[in-house]
Amino acid sequence: MPEEKKDEFTKFREIIARLRAPEPDGCPWDRQQTHISLKPYLVEECYEVIDALDKEEPQKLREELGDLMLQIMLHAQIAAEHDEFNIDDVIHDINEKLVRRHPHIFSNVEAKDARQVRLNWEEIKTREHGKKKSILDGVSTEIPALPASQILQQRASRVGFDWDDMAGVLDKVVEEAGELNRSANHQEKVAEFGDLLFALVNLGRWLDVDAEAALKSANQRFIRRFQHMEQICHEKNLSLDKLTLNEMNILWEQAKAELKES
């Protein structure tokens, strides 16, 4: 790392320590924060980074990564104040882990492809913890359901628990849709709807489509098209809620076509 970058990192750490300092030097807001109180901000900043990635805006990404680093440094500083660990310990541990779990790079282990790398990674994790763990352990319950289901399915596929081809995945989607249609009560509908969503996420995995990103994109398309319908109604002095469903569908198709052309 260039010397000037090291100086910036040191400056960053010192700024955070100053903000957390006792009265009268520190900031009252920063000083009262705890690991728990900072949780919502950590989640928010992660989503801001993802948004910048989706929009492919390098300057925005640069800014949001800085905000995310702020949250990491605050947590490390709080831990340091309780004599638990500091940011140097965090960096040391991840350096050690990266070297340890990439023996095909830093040692003499061979890995012919990405799948073998993942299998090695899981095997090393098992040895580190000293006992056989489920390959599904460690998936946080805080992760939203769509990406969590994708992660679970990816992990299961690492040990061969997967379909031979996408035809089986499509058949499963059709099967789950049929079971939902045959649901006898609300409790069954909830369960079968969840199974259908799970199967659709699996189909997305086979198509190399991120389920959360795809649904987010669909939400945005719906917003644009619906708002365009409202604009058409405004221009024609129509009231959307007075139209029939067929008239609304005609407007919907018009909005789709016009937005596609633009």
Image (cartoon, grey):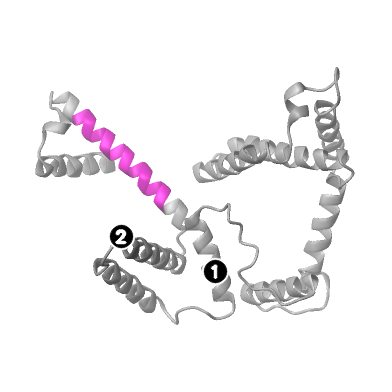
Residue 187: % across, % down: 34, 62
Q: Residue at x 36, y 78 (%)?
A: 167
Q: Residues within 10 Å of mark 2 (few under 14, many from 20)?
A: few
| Side of 182 where 193 appears, left or right | right
Q: What amino acid type should be assigned to the residue bearing mark 1?
A: Gln
Residue 83 seen: yes
Image position of 1 with respect to 171: above or below: above
To which residue does mark 2 refer? 186
Q: Give the alpha-carbon distance from disc 1 to disc 2, as whole Å.
A: 30 Å
The numbered dot on residue 154 is 1
Using residue 55 as the reference point, say whether residue 135 is left or right of it. Answer: right
The residue lying furthest to the top in this view is 24
Three-letter code, disc 2: His
Q: In which quarter of the image is the C terminus?
A: top left
Q: Nearer the viewer, residue 197 or 250?
A: 197
Magenta-colored span:
215-232
Would residue 84 appear left or right of 134 to someone viewing this image?
right
The number of numbered badges drawn on the structure is 2
Report the front residue among 172 and 24. Answer: 24
Q: Is the magenta stretch mostly helix, strand or loop?
A: helix
**Residue located 78% across and 79% down the image:** 109
Residue 111 image offset from top left, x and y in percent: 70, 78
Q: Which of 120 and 153 is in front in this view?
A: 153
Circles 1 and 2: CB atoms closer than 8 Å = no
- Whichever of labels 1 and 2 marks the residue nearer the N terminus, that label is 1
